[in-house]
Amino acid sequence: MKKTPKNYTLHSRKNNLNKTSHNNTNFPLSPHHNNYYVDIFSSDEKRVKKKKRIPILRILSFVFFMFLGILGGMMIYTYNMLHSFNYEEIPYEEGKTSKSEDNGAVDGLFNDNKVLNVLLIGSDSMSAGDHGRSDSLLILSLNIRAKKIKVTSIMRDTWIDIPNYGKDRINASYAYGGPKLTIETLQKNFGILIDRYACVDFEGFSKIIDALGGIDIELTAKESSYINTYSKDKNTLKGAGVKHLTGLQALHHSRNRNSLGSDYDRTMRQREVIKAMIESMKKAGASKITEMISTLAPLITTNFKISEITRLVTRGMTYLNYPVEEYRIPADGNVRDEIYNQKMVLVINNLSKAKSDLKNFIYELNDERK
């Protein structure tokens, strides 16, 4: 019996496959078909796929390493920014500044874990070993519970008890013992916890405002004239109205106690400047604020921790949109003028009432929390 050649069998099967494929209208047609047959193990196909993969891998690698470079640069920038502040701890803080779980007394001082009290100190001297006198004292309270920013200015002529020094004007506490003694004085007399402080001298204050691009404040004609006379700024202000102030102009406006002859008006101007700075920060945006902080950090002395500054910067735009409310110590109706040691001073009539009023303003206490 004659055997059928092997090649005949193979040829027949191939023809049958070709016929079947041709008759199957559902079989997808592709440019890579060879008589409607795809050999997925073709060496040519392998080479085509390799040529496609190599450029993609190169692009992905380039993007990845570029991302790492940008991230590394940002980390270095952030590290340098955060470490350029002048950090100065105050010894008594250790073990005493932790907030209670909700609110209440810490070492006899009222506090709330949803309220951050920061003492802002404007000094007339930042030279080593010489604190100078605090030209301005303000408590900036970030009340997250009420979603408000509270600004309390403390008149520098307030006659008050300074620990270990007796009665004196409150601005003398900074000259005697720097931020530590100033905080102790406020806490002893008003019974609230001061969480952190930030101190800047006049030059630094002016640069902060310039870094923001200036601020807008409504002035009287006399205030404009005062600024022109004492600031010597080349941008002369004319008449009354809303004026755009440079850092130098804003500095002299906040120190002005002559145009209306009163420290009450001076502290009011300081609160206006703080509010105007907050408005400028809103317009500046997060990136501009970060850039500003990196430039001005060396001019600021503080006991804020690096982690705290990071959180504040991260959430800064939310906090800046909180409404701002003002207060002053001593308050109207609870103060009298007197002369001690040939110095004109402001004496608080009822310190207990002053303490209660300040607490209610900052914390917005209801009956259950008082």
Image (tube, grey):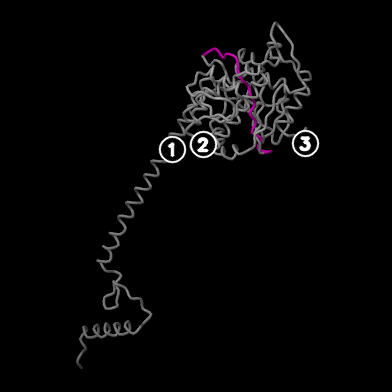
Disc 1: CA contacts within 10 A as few (<14), some (14-19) or many (>=20)? few
Which quadrant of the view contains residue 110?
top right
In the rendered view, does 72 fall on the left or right side of 338?
Answer: left
**At which x and y percent is residue 158?**
70, 16
Q: Which mark is residue 366?
A: 3
Report the magenta residues as a range. 128-146
- Between the C-alphas of marks 3 and 2, the distance is 36 Å
Q: Which residue is mark 1?
A: 74
In primary-sequence order, the first of circles 3 and 2 is 2
Quarter of the image for the C terminus: give it: top right
In primary-sequence order, the first of circles 2 and 1 is 1
Which quadrant of the view contains residue 102?
top right
Q: Which residue: 29% across, 78% down?
A: 36
Name the outermost residue toward the top: 342
- Identify which amino acid the numbered label 3 is placed on: Asn
Q: Are marks 2 and 1 in contact (CB under 8 Å)?
A: no
Disc 3: CA contacts within 10 A as few (<14), some (14-19) or many (>=20)? few
Q: Marks 2 and 1: which is nearer the front?
A: 2
In the picture shown, does residue 98 fall above or below 169?
below
Whether residue 86 is visible, yes or no, is no
Residue 135 lies within the magenta run: yes
Q: Which residue: 52% across, 22% down?
A: 248
Q: Secondary structure at mark 1?
A: helix
- Between the C-alphas of marks 2 and 1, the distance is 20 Å
Which quadrant of the view contains residue 151?
top right
Q: Which residue: 37% across, 48% down?
A: 63
